[in-house]
Image (tube, grey):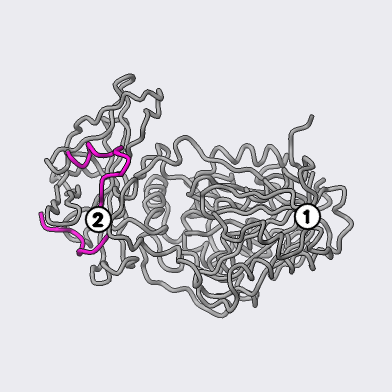
Amino acid sequence: MNRTLRGATAVVGVGETTYYKRGQSPDAEFNLALKAILAACQDAGISPKDVDGFASFSNDRSDPSRLANALGIHDLRFSNMQWGGGGGGGSAAIAHAAAAVATGLAECVVVFRALAQGQFGRFGQGPRSNVVSGAGAFTVPYGLMSPAQSFAMKVRRFMHDHGVEQSALRAISLASYHHAQTNPRAVMYGRPLDEAWIVEPFHLFDCCQENDGAAAMIVVPAERAKDFDHPPVYVLSAVTGSHYRAGASVHNTPDYATSNFKTCVPRLYGMAACGPDDVDVLQCYENFTGGVLMSIVEHGFCEPDECNEFLTKENLIAPDGALPTNTSGGNLAECYMHGLELNIEAVRQIRRTSPNQVEDVDVAMVVSGPMVTPVSSSIYGSEATV
Amino acid sequence: MSAYLNPGLPKPAPAPDGLDAPYWEAVAEERLVMQHCRACGTWQWGPEWICHNCCSEDLAFDEVPLTGRIYSYERVWHPVHPALNEQGPYIVVLVEFPDHDGARMVGNLVGDPRQAVVIGAPVRAVFEHHPDDDPPHTLVQWEVVDS
């Protein structure tokens, strides 16, 4: 038995709601999920009753049984959640959907993520309790509590070890904002970088947005992939994991200054049977620009000591950059749909429908949730790759 | 020492499961402890029920020196809690204990919040007691050692 997901499944439908600034969705979170799923079904040209599975991540609140009930699904076969890791599950959910479809557990799985931060809590704020115990007791009372604060020291240490300058982080943000200006869906369409410090080494422009919206993708077996309205986009690889003691509390992970992909990357390229030179376009989750920078290094696109030279706006923008990155505007400037919108942009690039289309894209990579644990990555390919 | 941060952040309390109780008892007495495996000698922090190296349950909380070195740091500008709205910038440091398997602790770097911070600089623990808070607790802060 050939134990691989390579080319066994394909994405045949994608759907997104309108993307809103946080708290501004007129729809309830669950309704956003339904709208994105219905949009993905319409894109694929299928009835929602043909869906038989759901995969999500980061404790998404839209329960698959309720979704199946609302959509009138007759035969729910797969109901899956990647534990933990915030946006680190964005490609893991694809891996799980692909694994379910490839092994016959299900035939048509929706990968989705829905967020309404007005209806529920915000990510970027500290806890409001009077006391904190457990691992948080060793960090929160020192004013170390938000995601930006939790990752800044990893990035600072990496910059220290490798002589990385702020300009390399800034280039990542410039590329995302540049791409957003040709994407009317982007929340930062027509908006400049905000230079305020949040926590050094991150300015506001180094930090993802917080948004409301939903996104969905439909995964089916490769043998059915050509039965739909769009050219199929094959899953060449999708992997997830964590390195040694990535989950050590109080910032005690021995290999600390990392985006956490070092053990995933050999499996990612091994399954896809390709390497960094084969990647035509990259969608790399920007929780913070420093995570993108370390991810680009750990996925083999440049050496740690080359960041200042490689990470320039010119290298990161479509269509002609050496590594066009976050071509829809990404989490920084399109929408923070917990990174699932990056997977959808990878699909658009292979379909040749991106707002910032790179020429002749056959291989598109997605990096999900750097610096969290577990993380995940995926590689998508055109018909030419399978 | 006086408090480094303005009052009103969540206060640390010993974990209900008892895992970290010896730490909180020690810092109240101005001793710094971390977990030390009786079976294999590995030091570990934060606290866990077993040793990550040999999986022994035989873990003690043993004293470590009140000195370490700065492994990384951050200067926070944007408040994410109402208690910090009037705080202005502050510095969080990650302090490494090189002779204790590289275990690390988090605290604030006392002194000018706009000071230049040097990774690798030696630091010394400063105990910040809050006996009148509910619950009473002690924070461990750090100051640069003049060399």
Q: Considering only vertical position in the picture, is A6 above or below B85?
A: above
Residue A322 shows in this picture = no
Q: Which residue is mark 1?
A: A233
Toward the viewer: B81 or B113?
Answer: B81
Q: Position of residue B86 (x, y in %)?
A: 24, 72
x 60%, y 70%: residue: A213
Q: Which residue is mark 2?
A: B11
Toward the viewer: A142 or A186?
Answer: A142
The N terminus of chain B sits in image quarter: bottom left
Toward the viewer: A217 or A274?
Answer: A217
Answer with left or right where residue A6 lies relative to residue B124.
right
Q: Amino acid at mark 2?
A: Lys
The C terminus of chain B sits in image quarter: top left
User: Image quadrant of residue A4?
Assistant: top right
Q: Amino acid at mark 1?
A: Val
Q: Judge the density around disc 1: few (<14), some (14-19), many (≥20) Cα neighbours within 10 Å.
A: many
Mark number displayed over residue B115? none
Q: Position of residue A375 (x, y in %)?
A: 55, 47
Q: Judge the density around disc 2: few (<14), some (14-19), many (≥20) Cα neighbours within 10 Å.
A: many
Toward the viewer: A373 or A53?
Answer: A53
Cα–Cα gap, marks 1 and 2: 51 Å
Give SS at disc 1: strand
Q: Position of residue A184 (x, y in %)?
A: 65, 77
Give SS at disc 2: strand
Predominant secondary structure in magenta?
loop
Q: Considering only vertical position in the picture, is A359 above or below B86?
A: above
Answer with left or right where residue A33 lies relative to residue A131.
right
Question: What span is in magenta?
Answer: B1-25
Residue A137 shows in this picture = yes
x 74%, y 33%: residue: A3
